[in-house]
Amino acid sequence: MQSLMDNISFQIIVANASHKDYSTQITDEMENSAKARGTGIAKRSPAYVETKMEEGKAVIALTSDGKWAGFCYIEAWGHGKYVANSGLIVSPEYRKYGLARKIKNEVFKLSRLKYPDSNIFGLTTGAAVMKINSELGYIPVSYSDLTDDNEFWKGCQSCINYEILMSKNRQNCLCTAMLYDPNSKRNHTQELALRDDFKKDLKLFDRWVRLKKYVMLKLNKSKDTLTSIFL
């Protein structure tokens, strides 16, 4: 699994215990990236990332000289009925090389190999990630289509938008939910048209993300205002 651009070569492989030295760098960048975007992610410790590496449930991208370039891992919920490709991160130094797409493709393949009958889902505020998911066969869904495993939703507690999620009874938030169903023939005209439209233009995703953020934050602000009035 090699890619070459501007004389930089990347190796994208299934991570293992030999890659544990990268864990702190990976989790630090996850946190820094979330802060820069002004959004939240479920915070993970280096130890958690190392466990995923040891289990063979992660994909890592390295340069030819051994520098860390990107990462993503697999989580299973509801006794393996649902699988999430989580923590996608690319080092700032290598964000113009199409690595996010390549890493997502590889972790998706790994998920299908380890959990062939599982629904693969994701929650994201990133337009680029939404487009990549769409190309892999995901479609936007409601939160009720995701796992009801409480352990998954506990992971959102470290997100800055957790209050919004809980105020919506875990039925909506700033993140967009997307799902890949391996048993679906995906022959519904509306779903196919929507996915094809999203594939064509990243701006559609970007507009959707900005609109949802505007609506959700405005609704939450209105709720806070009403609460302060009546208290």
Image (cartoon, rainbow, N blue to C red):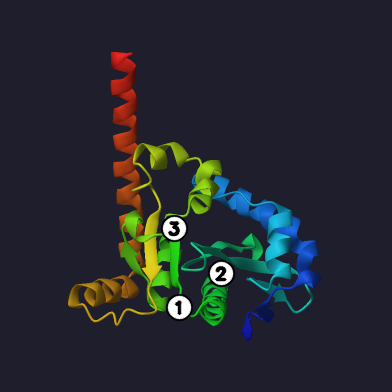
In the image, residue 198 sits, relative to residue 157, either above or below, namely below
Q: Which mark is residue 80?
A: none
**Which element carries disc 3, helix, strand or loop?**
strand
Mark 2 burial class by Cα count in 10 Å: few <14, some 14-19, many 20+: few
**Which element carries disc 1, helix, strand or loop?**
loop
Quadrant in which residue 1 is drawn: bottom right
Residue at image location 32% in from the left, 79% down from the top: 184
Quadrant in which residue 9 is drawn: bottom right
x and y, in percent, of residue 217 in the image: 35, 38
Residue identified by numbered label 1: 117
Separation of disc 3 and disc 2 at Cα?
Answer: 23 Å
x and y, in percent, of residue 54 in the image: 74, 69
Q: Identity of the amino acid at label 3? A: Leu
Foreground pick, 211 / 226: 226
Residue at image location 29% in from the left, 43% down from the top: 215
Q: Identity of the amino acid at label 1? A: Asp
Please state if 32 lies on the left or on the right of 152 as rendered.
right
Separation of disc 1 and disc 3 at Cα?
Answer: 20 Å
Residue identified by numbered label 2: 96
Foreground pick, 139 / 130: 139
